[in-house]
Image (spheres, rainbow, N blue to C red):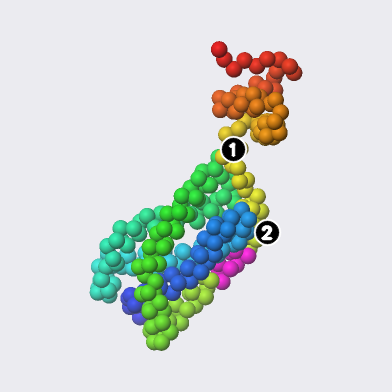
Amino acid sequence: MPVPQPNPAGNERLTAAVGLLLLAPSLVVVATVLLGVHTFMSVHVFFGLFLIPLVLLKLATTGWRFARYYSRSPAYVSQGPPQIAMRLLAPLFVAATVVLFGSGVAMGVLHGHALQIARNLHGPASVIWLVLLGIHALVYLGRALRTTVAEKRSRMRGAAERASVLVGVVIWGLLLGAATVPAQHRWVDLPRDHHDRRAAPPGLGTARQAGDSRSRTGGQEPAKRNLLEVMAEEGDGHALHDREPGSVVRVGR
């Protein structure tokens, strides 16, 4: 059985093609955030999951080139190293990618404190990932387009296999997004005010909302509302339920 020969040009073409495939769904995900992610959460989740196979393939092709270059494979060394700036950004880009998609999936599975951690990670990771994706696109978009055009014009060794891989990951992404549609309520029903719910003791949120409503209507309840806020900050909200009606509450001397 013949030993497969290194094919750095084929690796470059596959990397360029999957990079171009990533752009359109990534823009859709960004659009859902700009238009209101809670309003378009189902679209956000579908395309986020659709991106996972494409991202995994991109990590695989770039990781393979990295490994072959630094293991001193002559064919890959002859292609030269990546740009120094992109090599320095690569670890951060990979880490942001793993955290972004990992936390996104986790938000539909986890509960309680673990869910809160995932939400706290997802936002910053998405900002970092989008910034680095933009830099990546500015640096490599022209080269990726030229490489993809060359792939169509000249059928280099492995072209059929590369096309099959690309079709496979697109189908995998569509199936992954479609398969999770029945479970999208796990993401869609995530509360918007998760910070407030975490901070307030059970039952206190309703009392605070009632106090806010009374204060807006000009009633004589602002003092109680302020007291509730103090108790929420001090963690003593339960004391309000243990007092008799009409009793005086002393905040301190």
Q: Position of residue 228 (x, y in %)?
A: 63, 26
Q: Would residue 187 appear left or right of 56 to someone viewing this image?
A: right
Q: Is residue 230 visible?
A: yes
Specify which label sits upstream in the sequence, 1 or 2: 2
Give, as a three-letter code, the residue at label 2: Pro
Mark 1 residue type: Asp
Rendered residue at 33%/75% (across/down): 8
* Towards the viewer: 23 or 107: 23
Magenta stretch contains residue 96: no
Q: Residue placed at 68% from the left, 15% from the top?
A: 248
Looking at the picture, does residue 211 appear above or below residue 104? above
Which residue appears at 68% of the width and 34% of the height? Answer: 216
Query: Element at badge 1?
Result: helix
In this view, the residue in front, 180 or 139, is: 139
Q: Main secondary structure of the magenta part?
A: helix
Residue 56, position in %: x, y? 46, 64
Q: Residue at x 51, y 65 (%)?
A: 27
Q: Nearer the viewer, residue 97 or 164?
A: 97
Q: Which mark is residue 46?
A: none
**In this rendering, is residue 157 above or below 166?**
below
Spot occupied by residue 218 in the image (x, y as percentages of width and height)? 70, 31
Q: Is residue 45 above or below residue 197?
A: below
Q: Quadrant of the C terminus?
A: top right
Residue under pointer 1: 196
CA gap between label 1 and label 2 equals 29 Å
Q: Magenta stretch?
A: 171-178
Residue 175 forms part of the magenta stretch: yes
Task: Classify the position of the N terminus by image quarter.
Answer: bottom left
Q: Secondary structure at mark 2?
A: helix
